[in-house]
Amino acid sequence: MIDREAVVRRHTIRYREPRPEEPVSLGNGEFAFTVDHTGLQTFADRYERDAARERGEAAMPLGTQAQWGYHWAPNPNGWQLEDTLERYESPRGPVAYPTAYDYREDREASAASGRAAGYYYWTNPQRLHLARIGLLLDGRAPAWEQVRAGAQELDLWTGLVTSTFAVAGVDVRVRTAVDPDRDAVAFELDSTLLDQGRLAVEIAFPAVAETFEAPPVWDRPQDHTTTLHRDGATAVWDRRLDDARYQVRAAGEMTVAGDGHHWRLRSTGSRLSGVVEFAATLGDDVLADADTVFARSARGWGDFWRGGAAIDLAGSTAEQAHELERRIVLSQYQTKVHCSGSTPPQETGLVCNSWGGTFHLEMHWWHAAHFPAWGRPELLERSLAWYATILPVAKDIAAAQGFRGARWPKHVGPEGVESPNVIGPLLLWQQPHVIHYAQLLLMASDDAAAVRERYRNLVDETAEFLASFALAGSDGAYHLPPPLMPAQEVYGARDTWDPLLELSYVRWALRVALDWRRADGRAEPPVWARVADGLRPTLSADGHYDAVQNPPRTVFTDHPSMLGALGVVPDTGALDHDAMLRTLERACERWDWRSAWGWDFPMIAMCATRLGRADIALDALLRDEGKNTFLANGHNRQVPHRMPLYLPGNGGLLMAAALLFAGWVDDGGTHRRVDLPAGWSAETDGFPARP
């Protein structure tokens, strides 16, 4: 039996100095609050990417964000998504896709190129920055030099951050936690500066920019309103930014004063404690006090760590075993905080915005598919329920393009409105994800019939689209035709045929969909079986698999997605394992790893694992590459001044670790587990079956 608390506490995060690139977050999947070394967001301006770029330093912003918090900018020109449609030729005839925008264009460039509508829909909606909560000294934000860091500790087992430091030479202690079930942050300050009236907490409210990074905006106070009213001892702020509205309330051992968008929370003694809650619309219940939230956080995180699966690598003698275990533990924490909410997460979670704060459905698998694979299916089901809300949108997309079923968009906000782009609307590989989620949930459940009942409609509509997208060829096989942008986004969508990952994934997904109908006693559409059987991978002349079946066939940059055809995708029996091993070795030898992304390394590891090569899998997971860096806070760094964190890398690591150390179940029902190299030993507990 694994001592789970010992495993987790081995990787407690402890700092002795400010770490602008590695702040810690507190959250519950639906809401998160990221803090600096003061335990609050005192120096949030310094952590913003623009400020860090000016200093030539790396930093990670300090967000206060929620899954429900979005804003659509005004649309005075009345643009419609149809204004971004472009014509593509296909073997079936012309079809229109919303691709009239190049994501490298800013507002001015898009207007000059005639693609202003594309820019609008690409940058809308933006995820809101709900507030900034930080310290004030003598009524002003303290200077960086006035705060001398002492120590900061994030107790992963309880979700509590304790920060000690000195302000103007006087000791301060701050404790911070987020409620596990509410969008609320609790804090407690202890310092003699409080009863001297010198130290206070400020809560301030910004607007948001319409850009890729969509940072908070502080110099447009006229663009939004903040209205305070009282509910007994509780302060309630009504926030409005264009059509976006939300509410904030604060209660505790404090007084509230201020105006405009800046408000001060003060104490008359040496202790200031309070809770700040955010909601689209607040309820009428009583807000808990800080001590209650601290206790709830401890219970919630204890339940999380005691539930689901665990991996203990302490028995390993390999030099990098402790580091891999650290990444595994911290990735569980970060994905619970940022990726387990009611909608798919954005790539940077609830820390800061990227791609305007919207989410990418081809990345949802990398963020959250590990939850059922680690015995925590309920954490995926929260966001999988969202797909049903946009099913009408997905069916309309498919119908407009001449297909049956539902075609899931790629880059969207909560409403499911596609973001125009020369890549996103042409992707295919997010489609089978929905079937994969459902199968993972089924295998993790004790009630398969209930899972099929809950998700059969999503599975059916997805399979219907996949079967109608495939094209029968004169060679007797089925093919995936253009326009098609593969997961490796370096090929021309107008010319791409049969990318290996997509070919294998559609084949597998259709077979799963048929299995579901068979288990329910429902009719099995013959076309699904014909397409699944007819999607046949093609070997190259020298015995490897190429990425696509049109020149240049394989480009050795970006994502080595052909390796996902056996790894991400379970074995369908269509791929020759010896040829796949040659493909893996060829990629490892020739790839430009500087161009790879965080999820590519676990994708390689999963391919190697299914081929019985745990040595290659471990090398991939621990490869010394910039985008395979895992910071002290557990985040997978990508581009320091643009994408300072990348949660698909964390979720991918967890999927790969589960496959490598706990194994999988093959089509015949046999449990498979790869032998580990010398020096590696893994104890596992709680892993359900997975394909």
Image (spheres, rainbow, N blue to C red):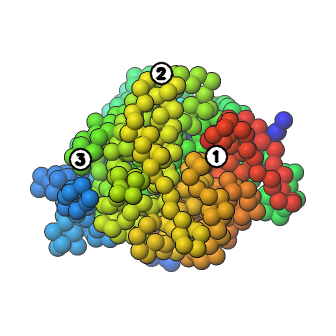
Observer-side mark, 2 or 1, equals 2
Out of 416 and 179, give the one closest to the viewer: 416
> What amino acid is found at the position of numbered circle 3 in the picture?
Gly
Q: Residue at x 58, y 68 (%)?
A: 544
C-alpha separation, residue under disc 2 versus residue under disc 1: 38 Å
Contact, mark 1 vs mark 3 (Cβ under 8 Å): no
Of mark 3 and mark 2, the one earlier in the sequence is: 3
What kind of residue is marked 1?
Gln
Q: Residue sitting at 25 percent across and 65 percent down?
A: 101
Per the image, the residue denoted by label 3 is 402
Lateral position of residue 466 relative to residue 81, left or right: right
Q: Residue at x 56, y 33 (%)?
A: 441
Disc number for residue 521: 2
In this orientation, does residue 177 appear? no
Q: Earlier in the sequence, mark 2 or mark 1?
A: 1
User: Where is residue 644 shown, x and y percent of the image?
Assistant: 52, 64
Return the x and y of residue 269 as percentages of the image width and height. Answer: 59, 39
